[in-house]
C-alpha cells in the first residue's frame, strides 16, 4: 500500500545509501547502512522483549562489540516466570505445550547470549531514576567510554519522547563516534510536536538513512504512520540524493505479516 507523506514530515526523506537488514524478518529486525554493522565497539540497546536477533547479528559482524541491553520486561527470570505460569494455566494441551517450549527455549537462549561480554540490565530507561527498577539515560550512557564507536537502538513504546532531550545531549557529546541510531517512534499523532522536534534535533548531528512504517500502528489523522522506525547514520552526507519513493526497498518486511506493508512516498 502506498502512502503519501505530508510535507510537514518532508525532513524525514532518507538520503541514498547502501542498506542492509539486520536481525529477523519481524518486528525485531531493522535496516541500517551496510557499513554500519561492521566495526561497532558498543551497541546501546533499549527494548529487548523476546527478540534480540538484531543484537545477535551485530555481535556476529562486530565480534569485539560489547552490547548493553536494557528492558524491565525481558530476561531469563521473566521467561522462567512465564514458563511456570503456563504450567498452571488451563490452556488446551497443544497450545500449552507450544508455549512451554517457547518460554523454555527463550530462557536458555537469553542466558547464553546475555553473558560475559554482553551485559543485560532488567531496568527501565528513564529521564530521572526514582527506584531500583530504573536507570537514568545519563547513568546508562556513563557506562560507555566516549571514545568507543557506538550504535544505538531504541524501542520503548512511547518513552522515547521522555528521554529525548537527554538522548540528544549524548549524541552531541559523542557525535564523532556514533555510527547509527535506530529508533521506533510510537503514537506520533499524539506526540506530533515532540516527534518533529526530536527528529530534527537528531538530524543536527546525523542524517536519515532509512524510514519504515510499522503497520501494526495504523495511520494517523494527518496521513502519517502512527508508528515509524527511523535509522539515523553518520555514514552518509547531505551531498547524497534523497530517496522520495518507496524508500523501504527490498529490505523491509511488514511487522504484521497479515497486513500489507506501507510504501512511503515523500512529496518534496
Image (spheres, helix red, strand yellow):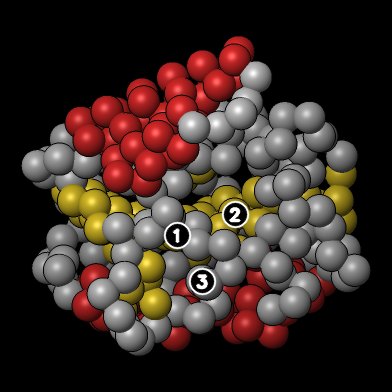
Which residue is label 2 attached to?
229
For mark 3, what is the residue?
A: 160
What residue lies at 24% left-to-right and 52% top-to-bottom? 120
Mark 3 is surrounded, within 10 Å at the Cα level, by few (under 14), some (14 to 19) or many (20 or more) other residues, namely many
Which quadrant is home to the N terminus? top right
- Circles 3 and 1: CB atoms closer than 8 Å: yes
Question: Do we see residue 62 in this rendering?
Answer: no
In-image side of 155 versus 83 (left or right): right
| Label 2 vs 1, first from the N-terminus | 1
Mark 2 → mark 1, Cα distance in angstroms: 10 Å
Q: In the image, 83: left or right of 214?
A: left
List x then y, in percent, for residue 217: 75, 54
Measured as percent of width and height from the top left, residue 215 is found at 75, 45
Residue bearing the label numbered 1: 154
Q: Residue at x 63, y 83 (%)?
A: 194
Dot 1: within a 10 Å radius of its alpha carbon, few (fewer than 14), some, or many (20 or more) residues? some
If you read the primary sequence from the N terminus, does the residue marked by circle 3 or circle 1 appear first? Answer: 1
**Mark 2 vs mark 1: in front:** 1
Picture quarter containing residue 56?
top left
Left or right, residue 134 beside residue 182: left
Q: Is residue 83 visible?
A: yes
The front one of 88 and 167 is 88
Answer yes or no: do the residues labelled 2 and 1 have beta carbons within 8 Å? no
Classify 252 as above or below 74.
above
Amino acid at each position: 500500500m502506498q502512502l503519501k507523506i505530508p510535507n510537514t514530515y518532508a525532513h524525514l526523506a532518507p538520503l541514498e545509501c547502501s542498506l542492509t537488514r539486520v536481525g529477523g524478518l519481524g518486528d525485531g529486525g531493522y535496516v541500517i547502512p551496510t557499513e554500519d554493522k561492521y566495526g561497532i565497539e558498543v551497541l546501546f540497546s533499549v527494548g529487548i522483549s523476546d527478540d534480540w536477533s538484531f543484537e545477535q547479528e551485530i555481535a556476529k559482524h562486530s565480534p569485539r562489540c560489547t552490547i548493553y541491553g536494557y528492558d524491565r520486561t525481558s530476561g531469563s527470570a521473566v521467561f522462567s516466570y512465564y514458563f511456570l505460569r503456563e504450567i498452571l494455566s488451563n490452556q488446551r494441551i497443544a497450545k500449552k505445550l507450544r508455549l512451554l517450549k517457547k518460554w523454555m527455549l527463550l530462557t536458555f537462549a537469553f542466558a547464553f547470549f546475555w553473558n560475559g561480554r554482553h551485559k543485560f540490565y532488567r531496568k527501565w530507561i528513564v529521564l530521572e531514576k526514582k527506584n531500583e527498577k530504573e536507570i537514568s539515560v545519563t547513568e546508562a550512557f556513563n557506562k560507555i567510554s566516549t571514545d568507543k564507536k557506538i550504535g544505538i537502538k531504541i524501542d520503548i513504546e512511547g518513552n522515547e519522547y521522555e528521554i529525548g532531550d537527554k538522548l540528544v545531549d549524548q549524541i552531541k557529546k559523542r557525535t564523532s563516534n556514533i555510527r547509527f541510531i535506530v529508533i521506533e517512534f510510537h503514537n506520533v499523532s499524539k506526540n506530533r510536536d515532540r516527534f518533529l522536534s526530536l527528529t530534527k534535533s537528531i538530524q543536527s548531528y546525523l542524517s536519515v538513512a532509512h524510514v519504515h512504517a510499522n503497520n501494526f500502528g495504523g495511520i494517523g489523522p494527518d496521513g502519517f504512520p502512527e508508528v515509524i522506525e527511523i535509522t539515523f547514520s553518520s555514514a552518509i552526507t547531505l551531498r547524497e540524493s534523497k530517496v522520495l519513493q518507496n524508500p523501504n526497498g527490498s529490505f523491509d518486511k511488514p511487522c504484521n505479516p497479515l497486513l500489507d506493508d506501507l510504501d512511503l512516498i515523500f512529496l518534496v
